Image: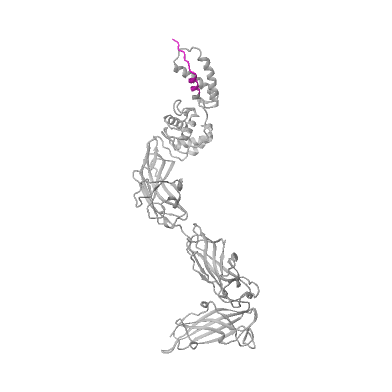
């Protein structure tokens, strides 16, 4: 008895939709549909329904082949590629990359996903099921000879692991499966040196903590604070691990990770594998720690999609490194942190698709927070600074720059620093400093790096200096002063400058002047004091010596002799001086107390000056050859610690014996002798 098979219009449409997903296939369906309208209308031969369906599918396949669509595939790898898979896939996984894998495999007849069910041609899904696994196994067999043999993949598996993924990526970058030899060569290069799971079982045998490289996190610095070693038995792929952090002190100011860190880094065998920004630290009460802080949250660092494949007996070393935040609050610098790799925090898969976790026992450690190294400055007056004396200034105009002081800036803590602002003060006899001082300049190696004019109170601020001080180095800065003419102030007024502070600076680690010792808190120090005259004499102490005449027999007294050599120069006009001991004013101190005149005897000799009529000597303008040798000898009754100080020198503006002018010997500390112990 004959059997006529009739398809309803809905059945026909469903068959066509199931097959069609490309232009070529749609043309095939249109052709087949036309044929079916004629063939199904006529009585069929004695065939079962299945036999007729099989015959129909064979016809469709043949027609597709004629149109260039191999084996009934609904597209080519060019519909998927280029594409890169970034993780290993196994039974039960889901995601867009699973669908891409099915589409990739469906583009090749030998690796096509099963013709029925999820993942079939035109019905790819995001679920990795048995059909997808079978297609992956076929893909491994297909490429074993060309690429996978160097990887020791003896038997195919259903696992889309590290080596299989690399080969798929190499081919998909080329644009289609197996299109060119170049694609296969690229796969070879990509896979060379990689490990392979094979089809054997594997596990993590043990996890143990190593001594970490760093025990503290420094500000703005990467610190390797947690290290552990994994021993592999068999072959496994580690695809995820979780690490946890918790602050171990509820008394500190902050328990927020972003107050301490900027990112976490996972390193394996010296290579950085993945980073996590501090904003992505998972914050919750995971209860992995038993600490003194029971109220603080823990931070989970989840490193996923690792794809780390290891062979039997491999022992990879994992390191967690954290980058310290900039300018951690001082209240937080004493915080202690705990870090843990809890039980079952590592997830892995072996060659037979078994997914396992490790370790069985938690691995923990702790670390601290350390303030980064900060520059430290030592700012002092240089011994090369000018000695105080009378200096020549103009009577009606500003003078040339006078180097009043040199100060040294020394960096002592091996951290580079840049100084941008310094404050100083200028002082004069007149309370309005602007009468005597026009401008003050800072000079380094002959170049002016900053300048300012004082206000009436003498305040000076040198800005935008950009003065770089290298670690463990010293820089000299000269302070030059431009004085106004004496028509604005009194002849003989005195002036000096004071260093106050570094008010703007930053070191190489981002610390500012408030953190840098010796910057804003530098001790004030003064230049010597200088007398301002448009005409007069200048004195300078050339040398001072002390000698002791020791008693030759019991009951006799020791005597001390102090000799000062003073250089003298006239400026502005000629001046005159008598060769009299009275022109040099001095004080002798015995045990720190000034002694009376009878305790010493002075003497004087003047050399290098011209003789004069009324006075003994004339000091010609600009002549610097004159010197005074002034000697003080102690009386026989003087005993104790004895020293002498020169206070001033008298001179005259006219050629007579009256010495009406006076020049001070300043600073006083520079004009005193050493001490002699007399008996």
What residue is shown at x 56% (from left), y 60% (from top)?
466
* Magenta-drawn segment: 1-16
**Foreground residue among 155 and 364:** 364
Q: Position of residue 229 (x, y in %)?
A: 38, 46
Image quarter of the N terminus: top left
Q: Note whether 614 is above or below 210 in the view shown.
A: below
Quarter in which the C terminus is drawn: bottom left
Asked if residue 575 lies left or right of residue 343, the reply is right
- Judge whether residue 150 can be spotted in this image: no
The percent coordinates of residue 369 (x first, y second) are: 42, 55
Question: 595 or 130, which lies in front?
Answer: 595
The one of 493 and 162 positioned closer to us in this rendering: 493
Query: How many numbered circles are shown?
Result: 0
The image shows residue 13, relative to residue 676, as above or below, that is: above
The way the protein has been coloured in the rendering is: one colour
Q: Residue 15 magenta-drawn?
A: yes
148 lies left or right of 67? left
Q: Position of residue 535 (x, y in %)?
A: 63, 78
Q: Nearer the viewer, residue 501 or 19?
A: 501
Q: Is residue 59 visible?
A: yes
Q: Position of residue 279 (x, y in %)?
A: 46, 47
* Among the 4 quarters of the image, the one containing residue 114: top left
Q: Is 520 placed above or below 5 here?
A: below
Q: Is residue 319 magenta?
A: no
């Amino acid at each position: 008895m004959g059997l006529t098979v009739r398809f309803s219009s809905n059945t026909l449409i469903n068959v066509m939709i199931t097959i069609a997903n490309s232009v070529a296939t749609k043309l095939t369906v249109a052709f087949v549909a036309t044929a079916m309208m004629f063939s199904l209308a006529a009585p069929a031969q004695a065939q079962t329904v299945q036999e007729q369906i099989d015959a129909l599918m064979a016809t469709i396949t043949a027609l597709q082949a004629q149109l260039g669509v191999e084996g009934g595939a609904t597209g080519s790898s060019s519909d998927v590629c280029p594409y890169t898979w970034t993780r290993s896939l196994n039974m039960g996984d889901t995601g867009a990359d699973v669908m891409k894998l099915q589409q990739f495999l469906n583009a090749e007849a030998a690796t096509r996903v099963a013709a029925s069910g999820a993942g079939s041609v035109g019905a790819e899904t995001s679920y990795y099921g048995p059909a997808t696994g079978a297609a992956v196994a076929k893909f491994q067999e297909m490429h074993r000879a060309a690429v996978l043999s160097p990887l020791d993949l003896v038997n195919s598996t259903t696992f889309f692991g590290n080596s299989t993924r690399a080969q798929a990526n190499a081919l998909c970058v080329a644009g289609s499966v197996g299109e060119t030899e170049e694609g296969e060569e690229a796969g070879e290069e990509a896979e060379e040196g990689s490990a392979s799971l094979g089809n054997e079982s594997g596990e993590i045998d043990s996890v143990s903590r190593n001594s970490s490289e760093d025990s503290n996190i420094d500000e703005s610095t990467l610190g390797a604070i947690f290290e552990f070693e994994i021993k592999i038995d068999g072959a496994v792929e580690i695809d995820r691990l979780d690490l946890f952090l918790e602050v171990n002190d509820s008394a500190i100011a902050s328990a927020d990770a972003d107050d301490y860190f900027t990112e976490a880094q996972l390193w394996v065998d010296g290579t950085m594998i993945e980073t996590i920004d501090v904003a992505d630290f998972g914050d919750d009460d995971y209860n992995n720690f038993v600490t003194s802080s029971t109220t603080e949250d823990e931070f989970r660092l989840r490193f996923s999609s690792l794809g780390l494949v290891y062979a039997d007996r491999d022992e990879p070393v994992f390191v967690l490194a954290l980058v310290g935040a900039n300018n951690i609050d001082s209240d937080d610098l004493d915080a202690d942190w705990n870090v843990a790799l809890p039980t079952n925090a590592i997830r892995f898969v072996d060659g037979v698709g078994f997914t396992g976790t490790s370790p069985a026992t938690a691995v923990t450690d702790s670390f601290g927070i350390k303030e980064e190294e900060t520059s430290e400055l030592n700012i002092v007056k240089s011994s090369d600074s000018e000695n105080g004396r009378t200096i020549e200034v103009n009577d009606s105009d500003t003078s040339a720059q006078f180097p009043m002081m040199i100060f040294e800036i020394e960096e002592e803590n091996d951290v580079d620093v840049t100084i941008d602002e310094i404050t100083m003060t200028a002082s004069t006899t007149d309370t309005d400093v602007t009468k005597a001082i026009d401008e003050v300049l800072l000079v380094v190696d002959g170049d002016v790096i900053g300048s300012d004019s004082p206000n009436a109170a003498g305040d000076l601020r040198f800005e935008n200096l950009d003065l770089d001080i290298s670690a463990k180095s010293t820089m000299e800065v000269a302070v030059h002063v431009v004085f106004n003419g004496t028509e604005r102030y009194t002849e003989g007024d005195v002036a000096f400058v004071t260093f106050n502070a570094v008010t703007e600076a930053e070191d190489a680690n981002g610390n500012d002047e408030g953190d840098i010792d010796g910057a804003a808190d530098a001790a004030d120090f003064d230049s010597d004091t200088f007398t301002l005259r448009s005409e007069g004499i200048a004195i300078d102490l050339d040398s001072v010596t002390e000698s002791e005449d020791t008693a030759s027999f019991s009951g006799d007294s020791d005597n001390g002799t102090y000799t000062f050599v003073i250089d003298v120069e006239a400026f502005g006009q000629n001046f005159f001086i008598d060769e009299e001991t009275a022109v040099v004013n001095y004080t002798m101190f015995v045990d720190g107390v000034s002694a009376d005149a009878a305790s010493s005897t002075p003497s004087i000799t003047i050399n290098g000056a011209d003789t004069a009529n009324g006075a003994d000597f004339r000091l010609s303008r600009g002549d610097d050859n004159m010197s005074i040798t002034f000697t003080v000898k102690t009386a026989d009754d003087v005993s104790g610690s004895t020293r002498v100080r020169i206070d001033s020198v008298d001179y005259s503006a006219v050629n007579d014996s009256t010495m009406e002018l006076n020049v001070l010997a300043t600073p006083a500390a520079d004009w005193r002798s050493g001490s002699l112990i007399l008996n």
